[in-house]
Image (cartoon, rainbow, N blue to C red):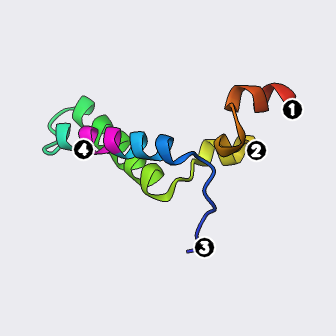
Amino acid sequence: MQKKPPNMSPFEGAVSLMLGLLFLVGAVFPRSLKQLFLLLAGGGLVYRGMTNHCGLYHALGVDARKGSVLTQLGEK
């Protein structure tokens, strides 16, 4: 698999990683739909935090390291 270039700030990646881990801990034993959602969301956030790459940012053509995402979207 090709490594994706980072498009998030290190702070945003760290926050994403921490939130993802919290979600995963909250969903260790998925017995309900809510826990399954937490498991999936947590896994996605951990991946996003570890790679510092956001698929949504990539699809929108923005890079959070270059300033406000909302400003970049407004310029398009």
10 Å neighbourhood of mark 3: few (<14), some, or many (≥20)? few
The answer to which of 26 and 64 lies nearer the viewer is: 64
Instruction: Calculate the distance from the C-alpha at mark 4 to the C-alpha at mark 2.
Output: 29 Å
Q: Which mark is residue 24?
A: 4
- Quadrant for residue 3, please give it: bottom right
Instruction: Calculate the distance from the C-alpha at mark 3 to the C-alpha at mark 4.
Output: 26 Å
Q: Which mark is residue 76?
A: 1
The answer to which of 54 and 38 lies nearer the viewer is: 54
Residue 56 is covered by the magenta coloring:
no
Q: Magenta stretch?
A: 18-24
Q: Earlier in the sequence, mark 3 or mark 4?
A: 3
To which residue does mark 3 refer?
2
Instruction: Calculate the distance from the C-alpha at mark 1 to the C-alpha at mark 4.
Output: 36 Å
10 Å neighbourhood of mark 2: few (<14), some, or many (≥20)? few
Provide residue 27's location: percent of width, then percent of height: 20, 40
Q: Residue at x 37, y 40 (%)?
A: 41
Q: Secondary structure at mark 3?
A: loop
- Quadrant for residue 9, please give it: top right
To which residue does mark 2 refer?
61
Provide residue 42's location: percent of width, then percent of height: 33, 43
* Tag count: 4
Prevalent SS, magenta region: helix
Which residue type does callout 3 highlight?
Answer: Gln
The answer to which of 1 and 71 lies nearer the viewer is: 71
**Where is 76 relative to 8, above or below?**
above
| In the image, farthest residue toward the bottom | 1
